[in-house]
Image (cartoon, rainbow, N blue to C red):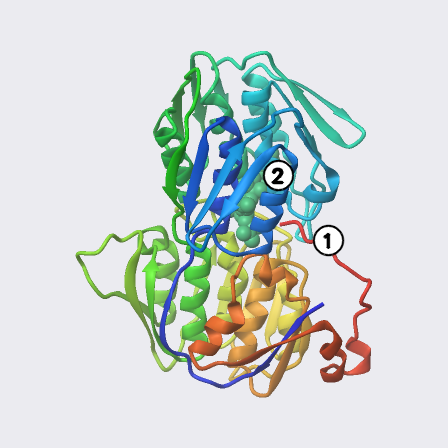
């Protein structure tokens, strides 16, 4: 398994641009199952999760054609409606084929996703929503099997103990486009990725209003057609780059920055002393150019992760790495995934002073972090370790970067272009740089399924 070797201490400077969003692209690709026409996407990021989704779509009878700019999906054969365990276990988001398959083919068989490295990740709300649309759902041999002649519109409440569900909203909204009659989703997820999906579906002929608010109304139609769509920029990648600049006291310009979708992050960063300046006030705030400028002394802050428009859980780990370097005590509370703290013991190995109690971590700021061999078992935790490594004194080896390859395209190349001293070590090189006790068996693969 590849690793990153980072010599910390380089100030990041320069200009980068944000790629298309992974978490938007996954349900949008699955939506191609709702039509027999071509659906073409631009801005699909080159990530392992995306390759997994394209492999799954091929298994489900789609042809895929790709060039530098565009990925086109077309259903050729509708006979297989089974998303197998092999794929679902490597990528939880495979579950977003459930709604489209059921609505278009009348049957969907999707392996039940298990928990993941940061806790239980149930899909009860997805299933409840589809049942409300008239699906008959059973569990057989670890597979969810859903049947329906034709779904029928209903009013559905999608709130759960931790708020709404993003992929659950995507599944129910997609399925309801082809239902008879009107569907209202109450307590829908308001995330921008849901708005991007609704925009795609409407361009395919669906009739959806209210996406981006807690009440989405879908008037069912008989069929959907093909379209072309550009994927929105990745707000989590954008936020990660902003925090990377701040961690190295850097000064970087980021293009295609979705400022409008990161207002909670901007607010927390502003308290800390990190300023996101929009460079051209005329530009679309969903994809504008910004400059990240950081005060010399970082201040502590208290924040809680929340559903959109609150502070995103997917930037909690990266923000924790930054707050390790603030002068004073910060408090972070995780309200979406109370167990999402895999990075805490690893950051501690780098000199961070962190005290966890349940879903809250107190971060006592330190003067500096020190490089160390570290590993993490999910995507965003790994990102926080890379950021910590950029700021740390000495050398950091971040093992298992396959987690990062799921969500950050060319991470080391982008950071290098900003002046970071970072290189990718191929699996066979890694042992040369790790103390013997850190060596990970080449056969040991931690399930990667966030
Ligand atoms: N939940 C339930 N029941 C359900 C579904 C969810 O109780 O049926 C709970 C979850 O356990 C969690 C909360 O509701 O506590 C929110 O989960 P949600 O369903 O919204 O998560 P998701 O849709 O599976 C997406 C992103 C995650 C991101 C979350 C929250 C994708 C592919 N994944 O997951 O992204 O953390 O929303 O914003 O869109 C990542 O990119 O690193 C990542 C994990």
Residue drawn at point x = 50 percent, y = 24 percent: 157
Q: Quadrant of residue 82?
A: top right
x, y percent for residue 62? 57, 35
**Would residue 418 appear left or right of 133 to someone viewing this image?**
left
Count residues near mark 2 (Cα–Cα under 10 Å), then give few for <14, some for 14-19, many for 20+.
some
Mark 1 surroundings within 10 Å by alpha-carbon count, few (fewer than 14), some (14 through 19), many (20 or more) = some
Q: Position of residue 139 (x, y in %)?
A: 75, 25
Residues 188 and 271: in front is 188
Task: Identify the residue under disc 1.
Answer: 447
What is the secondary structure assignment of the residue under circle 1? loop
Vertical position of residue 239 compared to residue 367: above or below: above
Residue 166 at least partly seen: no
* Pointer 2 with pointer 1, Cβ within 8 A: no
Q: Please tell me which residue is depicted at 39% across the width and 53% down the height of the picture.
A: 233
Mark 1 CB in 8 Å range of ligand 1? no
Q: In the rendered view, would you say 23 is above or below 401?
A: above
Give the side of residue 192 with respect to residue 98, left or right: left
Q: Residue at x 42, y 21 (%)?
A: 184
Residue where numbered disc 2 is placed: 58
Residue ranking furthest to the left: 282
Residue 138 visible in the displayed image: yes
Depth-wise, is mark 2 or mark 1 nearer the camera? 2
């Amino acid at each position: 398994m590849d690793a990153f070797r980072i010599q910390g201490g380089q100030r990041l400077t320069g200009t980068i641009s944000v790629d298309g969003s992974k978490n938007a692209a996954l349900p949008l690709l699955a939506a191609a199952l709702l039509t027999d026409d071509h659906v073409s996407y631009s801005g699909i990021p080159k990530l392992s999760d995306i390759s997994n989704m394209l492999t799954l779509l091929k298994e489900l009878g789609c042809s895929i054609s790709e060039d530098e700019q565009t990925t086109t999906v077309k259903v050729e054969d509708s006979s297989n409606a089974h998303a197998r365990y092999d794929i679902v276990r490597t990528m939880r988001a495979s579950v977003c084929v459930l709604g489209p398959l059921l609505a278009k083919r009348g049957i969907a068989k999707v392996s039940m996703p298990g928990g993941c490295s940061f806790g239980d990740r149930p899909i009860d709300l997805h299933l409840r929503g589809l049942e409300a649309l008239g699906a008959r759902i059973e569990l057989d041999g670890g597979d969810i099997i859903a049947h329906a002649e034709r779904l029928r519109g209903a009013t559905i409440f999608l709130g759960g103990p931790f708020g709404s569900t993003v992929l659950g909203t995507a599944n129910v909204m997609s399925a309801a486009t082809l239902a008879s009659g009107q569907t209202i989703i109450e307590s829908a997820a308001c995330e921008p990725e849901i708005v991007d999906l609704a925009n795609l579906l409407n361009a395919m002929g669906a009739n959806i209003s209210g996406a981006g608010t807690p009440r989405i109304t879908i008037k069912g139609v008989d069929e959907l057609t093909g379209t072309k769509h550009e994927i929105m920029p990745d707000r989590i990648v954008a936020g990660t780059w902003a925090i990377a600049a701040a961690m190295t006291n850097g000064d970087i310009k980021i293009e295609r920055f979705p400022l409008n979708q990161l207002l909670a992050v901007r607010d927390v960063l502003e308290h800390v002393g990190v300023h996101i300046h929009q460079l051209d006030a005329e530009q679309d705030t969903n994809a504008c150019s910004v400059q990240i400028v950081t005060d010399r002394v970082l201040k502590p802050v208290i924040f809680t992760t929340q559903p959109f428009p609150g502070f995103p859980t997917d930037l909690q780990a990266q923000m924790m790495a930054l707050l390790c370097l603030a002068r004073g005590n910060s408090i972070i509370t995780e309200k979406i995934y109370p167990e999402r703290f895999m990075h805490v013991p690893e950051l501690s190995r780098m000199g961070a002073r962190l005290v966890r109690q349940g879903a809250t971590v107190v971060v006592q700021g330190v003067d500096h972090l020190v490089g160390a061999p570290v590993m993490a078992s999910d995507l965003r935790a790994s990102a926080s370790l890379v950021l910590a490594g950029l700021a740390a004194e000495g050398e950091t080896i971040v093992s298992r970067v396959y987690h990062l390859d799921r969500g950050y395209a060319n991470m080391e190349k982008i950071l290098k272009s900003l002046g970071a001293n970072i290189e990718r070590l191929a699996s066979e090189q890694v042992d040369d740089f790790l103390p013997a006790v850190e060596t990970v068996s080449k056969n040991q693969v931690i399930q990667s399924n966030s």
